[in-house]
Image: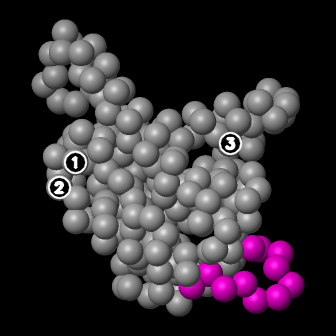
Amino acid sequence: MQQGRTPLGVKNEVFPEKTMIFGLFGKKNNNQAIVDRQYKALTSAARMPELYERLNVPDTVMGRFEMLSAVMILFFRRTRTSGTSGQEIAQEIVDAFFEDIDYSIRELGIGDNTVPKRMKKLAGMFYGRLEAYSKAMDIKDAEGLATALVRNIHPKANEPVDMGGLASWMFAAEDYLLSQSEDVIATGSATLPKVA
């Protein structure tokens, strides 16, 4: 992996080359509004009741983490071929996701000393899911994706859990995101489909 790049090649740079210092402040504020708008849309998609009521995702803290992770992964995959602004937005959204998780952990009363360990574990879980889901999605393997979803969302299930519906929704959501223009991505206006 090249230095300064994340696993999918999304740039992780604070200062792009040849950027004038005075332009940074306005760009950051503009990006923040875009990131906030897109992050809100993604978290709303991850909270759709149908995901929990019809697609076998438990409505628990970890179930919601799993759906937020899945939605972030879908957006991350969409932006990996985007221009620089789309990739920057994706990285800022993933950063916001982890800031949100950090805040939530602290709100649950987890001690400050253990938060970094938990964050490291959750980051490892996220990037493990990114790799597993991408591996299946890259080759259009719905069964492989469903298996990965069962392993991650229902790790202690004693009986088989059907995650085929969620896998189908994720493939449909990826197609839906791919159909949206670069302008939609660059303005933080991307949406995900409802559960069919």
- Amino acid residing under circle 3: Met
As measured in the structure, the alpha-carbon distance from the residue carrying label 1 to the one carrying label 3 is 31 Å
Q: Which mark is residue 184?
A: 1
Q: Please tell me how crowded label 3 is: few (under 14), some (14-19), or many (20+) other residues with Cα within 10 Å.
A: some
Residue 9, visible in the rendered structure: no
Q: Residues within 10 Å of mark 1 (few under 14, many from 20)?
A: some
Residue beneath the point at 31% across and 67% down:
176
Checking the image for residue 119, the label placed there is 3
Foreground mark, 1 or 3, reads 1
Spatial distance from mark 1 to mark 2, Cα to Cα? 5 Å
Q: Is residue 73 visible?
A: yes
Label 2 is placed on what type of residue? Ser
Q: Main secondary structure of the magenta part?
A: loop
| Mark found first going from the N terminus, 1 or 3 | 3
Count of numbered circles in the view: 3
Q: Which residues are magenta?
A: 154-164
